[in-house]
Amino acid sequence: MPLRLAPLVFLLALLSPMAAAAERFALDPVHTRVMVAVDHAGYSKAIGTASGSTGVLAFDPTDWRQARLEARVPLQRLDFGDTAWNRAVAAANLLDATRTPEAHFISTRVEPVAGDEAIVHGQLTLRGVTRPLALQVRMNALKRHPMPPFRRTAGFSATATLSRADFGIDAWPAMIGDSVELRIEAEAFASRTARFSDETAPEGPLDSPAPAG
C-alpha cells in the first residue's frame, strides 16, 4: 500500500460502523422483570414474575448486529403469588433453585428485523442444562432518564417460548404444561464499569441501579 494512502485507510477504519465500540449498559434490577406463563392442568395459565435480574448489554442502535447481552435471573425470587406454590416450583424436581439459583442467558448473534426490533439468539442455561433460545426484542426508548441521576437509559420488551422438558424440567406433566411463555420488560443504564463474565472486572465503585419510579 502506498504510504500516502495509509492515513486515509486508517481514518476510514475508525469511522466504520463495524469499528465503532458499542455503548455499555448495566441491567437495572429494579426496573427489569421477567414473567413466565405455563399451562395449569388446562384450567388457566399460571403466571410468575421475577425481579432482581442483573447483566450487561453492549449496544449501538445503528448496528444491532454488534449488540451483545448477558443476563442472570434469580430463580429463588420467582413469585407465583403463593408461598407454598413458590416452594413447589423451586423444589429439586422442578427448578432446583437451591442447587442452580440462576438462569443465565448469553447472546450469540443478533438478527435485525426493523429499526427498533431484532431477534436475539443465544444460549440459556437453566437447571444446569444449556439450550438455544431466541428472544423477540423491541427497543422502546434510548434517552436520558428524567429522574436523578439522569443517566442515559435503554428500555426493551422481549418475548420467547421454551420447552421445560428441554431443560430436564419434566415433573408433573399432567398438571404442568411443557411450553413456557416468557415476557421480559427491561431497563439498562449506561455504565462505565459493566463487564461481561469473560472480561476482567474493573477497579473502582460499581454503578448503582436507578431509584424506583
Image: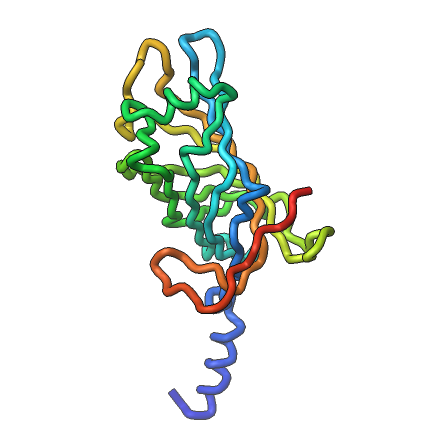
Residue at point 62%, 50% (across, down): 210
Q: Position of residue 202 (x, y in %)?
A: 44, 67
| Observer-nearest of 126 and 19 | 126
* The furthest residue to the front: 83
Identity of the residue drawn at 32% across and 39% down = 125
Q: Position of residue 121 (x, y in %)?
A: 40, 43
Color style of the picture: rainbow
> The C terminus is located in which quarter?
top right
Lateral position of residue 61 relative to residue 6, left or right:
right
Q: In the rendered view, does 37 fall on the left or right side of 125?
A: right
**Towards the viewer: 57 or 78:** 78
Front residue (pair 159, 11): 159
Count every numbered label the image shows and give the total: 0
> Where in the figure is residue 8, as x and y percent of width and height?
50, 83
Q: Is residue 146 toward the left or the right of residue 186 in the image? A: right
Q: Position of residue 78 (x, y in %)?
A: 46, 30
On the question of residue 138 being in view, the answer is no
Q: Quadrant of the N terminus?
A: bottom left
Q: Which residue is pictured at 58% across the width and 46% down the height?
A: 187
Considering depth in this image, is 125 or 210 the residue closer to the camera?
Answer: 210
Q: Residue at x 42, y 29 (%)?
A: 161
Direction from residue 77 to residue 108 in the image, left or right: left
Residue farthest to the right, as pictured:
146
Please say whether residue 212 is visible from this viewpoint. Answer: yes
